[in-house]
Image (cartoon, rainbow, N blue to C red):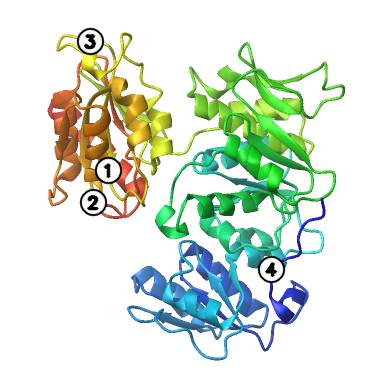
Amino acid sequence: MTPPEPGPGGLLDTLDRNSSWGGVTAVVAGFGVSGYAAADSLQHQGAQVVAVDESDTAELREKATVLRTLGVDVRLGPGSTDVLPDDVDMVIASPGWAPTAPLIAAALERGLPVWSEVELAWRLRADDAPPWLVVTGTNGKTTTVRMLESILRAEGLIAHAVGNVGRPVLDAVMDPEPADVLAVELSSYQLHWTHSMAPQASAVLNVAPDHLDWHGGLDAYTADKGRAYLRTEVACVYNADDPVTERLVEEAEVVEGCRAIGFTLGVPGLSMLGVVDGVLADRAFVKDRISNAAEIGNVEDLGVDPAPHLVANALAAAALARAHGVSPRAVRDGLRSFTPEPHRIALVSVLDDVRYVDDSKATNPHAALASLRGIEAVPDGGPSSRSDDDTSPRAVWIAGGLAKGATFDELVSEIGPRLRAAVLIGADRAVIAAALARHAPDVPVVEVETGDTDLMDRVVEVAASLAQPGDTVLLAPGCASMDQFANYAARGDDFAAAVARRRTTS
């Protein structure tokens, strides 16, 4: 199927890396990592740039000083983003800037193009630019893109993980020492404002409710995730165990000849990757795939007893790498050398035969559910069948924060039998408490007030008092962190530090 033409941009659609952008005035909304990269790149191309941000930190002021010497108009502090300047040709929206933000809404009302930093990066690629292997999904993006980077490097390629993983795509695109291939992690925010990208291969790992307040509903959120597949050239990788991702592939307008490639934790069907007796098997990128499969690694290459979602991430990364032409050996070697990122189901300590695990990166119910599934279920039924002397391993679940419009009924219905207790924090802890009351009423619930100055010390103290030998105290909040912490990493660090203090005093 012929892919759709890029979104409206008028004369801007003719501009690229080799063009002079003189006469173009661009507003960069947000002066964080990607916003700085966009402002810097646009001024380098000759555009007039106005960068705005409500924050006014020392770090932003330092960056502003650099760009101001180059002629960029940087406006920081409260009120700087309230009004869209006159005589503007385009707006670059940093991740998180919703269509309802006043400055963005004004741009849309004027009919101005609104691009992400990713869209700008795509248009500023060199003539011999490396292909993009794109990863999105509600959960597992960073792990998958890091696995993909490791696999590509095991093949001897110069590969970089960029995008939502930390390094702006623009930095890689404008790097004077280009890569052979880019592993690009994209959020739904970034995809919403990306119009012309055409990946070599793309993957949507899963879709579950998240950021619904930003997108306005699940359908809109799902549609933005599906934008990753548009104009894909070689392979659209989908999760065979998540029907939504398969439907998004079926609906996507792609380059003629592009293949749909599934991954599954079960035995792979035709044109799929999966698992057979602990072997990672490829029935998609082999000759005579009707009757043959290639061994591309083993589950044990991912560590001792890896979580199911980690295996799924590995299969998705392998599919993208194989679409680029990587060998089975490189897949195996890349997975063996992969090291997980911090705050992703990381064992912090074992105290009094209780495991303390940090999965602060679980910022939505879908991710928290994946963590909780790793806790052994009660053998004989649900919470109502438990007795006080039951010693089956369970989780003391630490949850709460900003729910972003998500609900927890489905999660609690499934994992109620896995819970010893729940310790709730944050602005939306009542949402989780209500779900527990409805679906797991026998699970003890303790709410720790947001005003506690020693929040995590108190949380760990309460969790330890509720846990029994063999249990796991699991920080898998299912919520964003910004109501109480700078980010999910700070939340995880505070948890680990509180556990360490308890270890030294016990």
Q: Residues within 10 Å of mark 2 (few under 14, many from 20)?
A: some
Q: CA distance from mark 2 to mark 1?
A: 7 Å
Q: Which residue is mark 2?
A: 427
Per the rendering, the mark at residue 50 is none
First in residue order: circle 2 vs circle 4? 4
Where does the image place residue 459, in percent across and percent down from the top left? 18, 37
Mark 2–mark 1 CB contact (< 8 Å):
yes
Q: Which type of secondary structure does the marked residue at label 4 adopt?
A: loop
| Identity of the residue drawn at 79% across and 48% down | 233
| Identity of the residue drawn at 70% across and 62% down | 196
Q: Which residue is mark 3?
A: 391
First in residue order: circle 3 vs circle 4? 4
Say whether residue 357 is left or right of residue 451.
right
Amino acid under label 4? Gly
Q: Is residue 280 above or below residue 448?
A: above
Q: Which type of secondary structure does the marked residue at label 1 adopt?
A: strand
Where does the image place residue 425, in percent across and percent down from the top left? 21, 43
Determine if residue 152 is in view.
no
| Identity of the residue drawn at 19% across and 34% down | 460
Mark 2–mark 4 CB contact (< 8 Å):
no
Q: Which residue is mark 1?
A: 400
The quarter of the displayed image where residue 258 is located: top right
108 or 193: nearer the eye? 108
Q: Which type of secondary structure does the marked residue at label 3 adopt?
A: loop
Front disc: 1 or 4: 4
Amino acid under label 3? Thr
| Identity of the residue drawn at 66% across and 27% down | 333
Determine if residue 133 is in view.
yes
Say whether residue 422 is left or right of residue 67.
left
First in residue order: circle 1 vs circle 4? 4
